Image: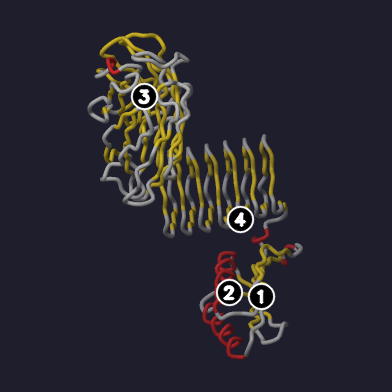
């Protein structure tokens, strides 16, 4: 999960709109930052080609002039969606002078970029000992990359020396000046810049970052520091058994089907995302300090606790069996149902489900995991095809009882009662696909259903799809 420099472009200068060049080495998936300095301080530049303004900082409200005036330092960013990105144009209608340069970073093949964040500030006291403490600590930890950019009111301030970034609580690597020559121009009211980057080797920040430099002459300016971070992404089927712990310092994304059993703990300091169907069993703790999101059905059993400091978002059904507690300091929200056994949902924010929240005895601890289909077909050939496909799929599966009689009338029914909820989910997906491709006539229904017969529990439909 290492972030490294891909390439840096050539700075451009001017008193009108600027079109900085993206380095030709840039590839799809790279993080592109456009570092931009300008005066007057109150400029409101815009950018095209899908770039986003991350933020900016100034060092005061002094009007622009030659070698005077408060500076604005701004950062734009974009994740490259092709190997040949179009150079962006920065439009600035009140431009006295500005400079822009694009710097590109790459990540590991299995990583995903976390949205960059940043903060900045200004040094309004003229001197050669330039120092800016950012307005806030955006959170830095091992593996992050910090990109720094500073703008000065005169070209006489550059070239700079002794450039550095420091973050209390973190051990940083070597600061690299990039571009290697400080950009400077005598266009308009004159200005200079210095830019660079430094990796966070270890630690966790406890204060806002600080950028310092020694200027060639006594001047003022502003600086903006951007934090880059990546998280792990796994797109294939993942099975983890007896793992001590899973820790993601940024974001852990499991995009494929995931089975995690006997895992000591799952901790994502940024975000834990489950995009595919997931089963978590026997895990000591699921903890996401940022947020926890799942997009497909998740079944949790025997999990000690689920603790979310930010928020817990579920877009599909979640089944919790024997879970100690679900604690969300922010909010618990979602569009599917939450089925809980021994789990207790708590939160200082709110519990809000657009579907339903069901508290009962564990539904899948009982006897039936059923898929119930009412389908009709245009002719006997299509009906026989569906019956044959279902029979073939069920070979080797453990079922309680099967009724497989799709007919050419509206009364055709397929009922399969499984011994596992996973087979139920997979079978429903299979039937949905075959009903679409054979096809079945419109208006039919496919339902997931459970009944706790052994515990004398009432039956409940979990999910319904209309053909």
Mark positioned earlier in the residue sequence (3 or 4): 3
Q: Residues within 10 Å of mark 1 (few under 14, many from 20)?
A: many
Q: Position of residue 256 (x, y in %)?
A: 46, 58
Q: Is residue 211 above or below residue 281?
A: above
Query: CB atoms at circles 1 and 4 under 8 Å apart?
Result: no
Q: Which of the marked residues, 3 or 1, is nearer the chain's N terminus?
A: 3
Which is nearer the N-term, disc 2 or disc 1? Answer: 1
Q: What residue is pinned by disc 1?
A: 373
Q: For numbered disc 3, what is the local secondary structure?
A: strand
Labels 3 and 4 touching (C-beta < 8 A): no
The disc at residue 316 is: 4
Name the residue: 48% across, 21% down: 135
Give above or below for 426 relative to 132: below
In space, the residues marked 3 and 1 are separated at their CA atoms by 69 Å
SS at mark 4 in the image = loop
Residue 419: image quadrant is bottom right
Q: Quadrant of the C terminus?
A: bottom right
Instruction: Tell me which numbered mark, 4 or 2, is placed earlier along the sequence.
Output: 4
**Disc 4/disc 2 C-alpha distance (Å):** 19 Å
Q: Residue 42 versus residue 366: which sits nearer the camera?
A: 42
Asked whether the beta carbons under mark 2 and mark 1 sit within 8 Å of each other, the answer is: yes
Looking at this view, name the residue that lies furthest to the bottom: 380
Callout 4–callout 2 Cβ contact below 8 Å: no
Distance from disc 2 to disc 1, alpha carbons, whole Å, reads 8 Å
In this rendered view, identify the residue nearer to me: 240 or 108: 108
Query: Is 215 situated above or below 340?
Result: above
On the image, numbered disc 2 is attached to which residue? 431
Front residue (pair 54, 285):
54
Name above or below for residue 128 compared with residue 75: above
Residue beneath disc 3 = 97
């Amino acid at each position: 999960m290492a972030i490294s420099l891909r390439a840096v472009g050539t700075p451009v200068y001017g008193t009108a709109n600027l079109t900085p060049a993206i380095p030709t080495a840039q590839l799809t998936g790279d993080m592109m930052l456009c570092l931009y300095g300008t005066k007057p301080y109150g400029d409101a530049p815009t950018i095209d080609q899908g770039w986003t303004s991350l933020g900016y900082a100034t060092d005061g409200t002094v009007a622009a002039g030659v070698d005077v005036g408060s500076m604005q330092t701004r950062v734009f960013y974009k994740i490259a969606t092709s190997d040949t990105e179009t150079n962006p144009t920065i439009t600035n209608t009140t431009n006295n002078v500005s400079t822009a340069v694009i710097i590109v970073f790459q990540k590991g093949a299995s990583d995903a970029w976390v949205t960059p964040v940043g903060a900045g500030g200004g040094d309004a006291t003229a001197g050669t000992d330039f120092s800016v403490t950012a307005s806030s600590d955006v959170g830095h930890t091992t593996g992050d990359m910090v990109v720094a950019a500073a703008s000065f009111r005169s070209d006489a301030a550059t070239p700079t020396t002794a450039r550095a970034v420091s973050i209390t609580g973190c051990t940083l690597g070597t600061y690299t000046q990039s571009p290697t020559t400080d950009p400077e121009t005598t266009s308009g009211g004159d200005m200079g810049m210095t830019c660079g980057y430094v990796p966070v080797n270890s630690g966790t920040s406890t204060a806002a970052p600080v950028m310092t430099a020694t200027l060639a002459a006594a001047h003022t300016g502003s600086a903006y520091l951007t934090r880059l971070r990546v998280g792990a992404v796994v797109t294939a089927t993942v099975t983890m058994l007896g793992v001590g712990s899973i820790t993601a310092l940024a974001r852990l994304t499991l995009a494929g089907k995931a089975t995690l059993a006997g895992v000591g703990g799952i901790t994502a300091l940024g975000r834990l995302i489950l995009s595919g169907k997931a089963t978590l069993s026997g895990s000591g703790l699921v903890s996401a300090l940022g947020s926890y999101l799942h997009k497909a059905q998740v079944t949790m059993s025997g999990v000690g606790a689920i603790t979310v400091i930010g928020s817990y978002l579920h877009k599909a059904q979640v089944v919790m069996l024997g879970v100690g507690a679900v604690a969300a300091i922010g909010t618990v929200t979602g569009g599917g149902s939450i089925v809980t056994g021994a789990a207790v949902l708590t939160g200082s924010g709110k519990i809000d489900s657009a579907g339903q929240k069901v508290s009962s005895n564990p539904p899948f601890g009982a006897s039936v995991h059923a898929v119930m289909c009412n389908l009709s077909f245009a002719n006997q050939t299509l009906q026989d095809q569906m019956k044959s496909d279902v029979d073939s799929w069920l070979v080797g599966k453990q079922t309680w009882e099967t009724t497989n009689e799709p007919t050419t009338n509206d009364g055709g029914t397929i009922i399969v009662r499984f011994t596992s909820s996973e087979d139920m989910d997979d079978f429903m997906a299979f039937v949905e696909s075959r009903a679409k491709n054979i096809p079945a006539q419109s208006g039919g229904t496919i339902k997931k259903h459970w009944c706790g017969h052994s515990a004398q529990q009432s039956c409940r439909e979990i999910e319904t799809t209309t053909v």
